[in-house]
Image: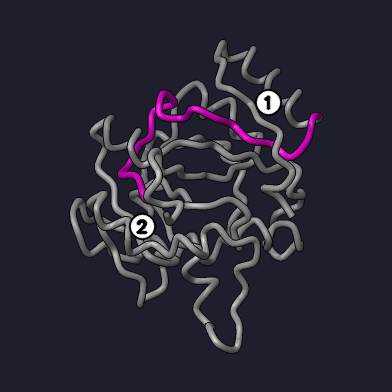
Amino acid sequence: MPIGFIRPTFIYRISHYRNLEFTLANGLFCRNSDKCDPNYFNIGHKNLIDKRGNRNVPIDPGGVLNDYVPFYFAPRSPMLYSINKGNVQGFQGTQNDIIYLVSSVQEIKASKIPYVFTDGHAYVEISQFYNTENDLRFVDWVIMGATYWNNTVNDNDRSRRRMAEFLVYQFVPITCIFGIVVIDDIMETTVNEIQRKCNTNIKTYVKPKWYY
């Protein structure tokens, strides 16, 4: 059975650990929100982030990509690979600084938060948008479960499909996050210290295989 049809259907957001204290205290806001972390530590390609502000979402609840909080459907994303290779302009850290915030499609749905998702990188024109759980069948769950997602001679669209996104409209409360994943024991200690400071107790997991 494809992994995407197992419930819960996990979704994964990567973030710099320096953003965690604000997130634990306030939740996750979309980039267009006036309640965003003023000291947010960006890990993405700035030019693409700016372009996402002009990419319309063609189905309800509409808006543009920057009106949504993005998650992936699998760990070891192409974005994390770029971070690991030092290919994100302006980002001075390493993948060791990156944490995962884990939720599920079902958790977002049960919280009655509007969402959409795509079958590939949301900015790419050919990617299709959906907003009902039944349409998760259009996500490529085989490639989500694969260790390697690079394009091949026989399939030059693998990378786009691996970057399919689950996009939560405007805001994700911290109550929807039920796991934090880190690369090693050092970052686990750091995350747990931040949690003690914030008086939260989300389970922290060390999963080096989620990294490169």
Residues packed near mark 2 inside 10 Å, few (<14), some (14 to 19) or many (20 plus):
many
Instruction: Name the amino acid type tagged 2.
Output: Leu
Residue drawn where x is 55% and y is 71% of the image? 159
Q: Pinpoint residue 168: horizontal percent, then vertical percent.
A: 34, 44
Residue ranking furthest to the right: 186
Residue 206 lies, with reference to residue 93, above or below; the image says above
Q: CA distance from mark 1 to mark 2?
A: 29 Å
Q: Quadrant of the N terminus?
A: bottom left
Q: Pinpoint residue 20: horizontal percent, then vertical percent.
A: 59, 30
Residue 203 lies, with reference to residue 82, above or below; the image says above
Residue ranking furthest to the front: 1
Number of numbered tags placed on the structure image: 2
Instruction: Name the amino acid type tagged 1.
Output: Val
Q: Secondary structure at mark 2?
A: helix
Mark earlier in primary sequence (1, 2): 2
Q: Which mark is residue 191?
A: 1
Q: Which residues are magenta?
A: 167-185
Residues packed near mark 1 inside 10 Å, few (<14), some (14 to 19) or many (20 plus):
many
Q: Nearer the viewer, residue 67 or 117?
A: 117
Q: Pinpoint residue 152: horizontal percent, then vertical percent.
A: 61, 83
Magenta segment includes 174: yes
Question: To which residue does mark 2 refer?
Answer: 65
Q: Which mark is residue 60?
A: none
Picture quarter containing residue 121?
Answer: bottom left
Q: Pinpoint residue 54: horizontal percent, then vertical percent.
A: 35, 65
Q: Is residue 114 left or right of residue 13?
A: left
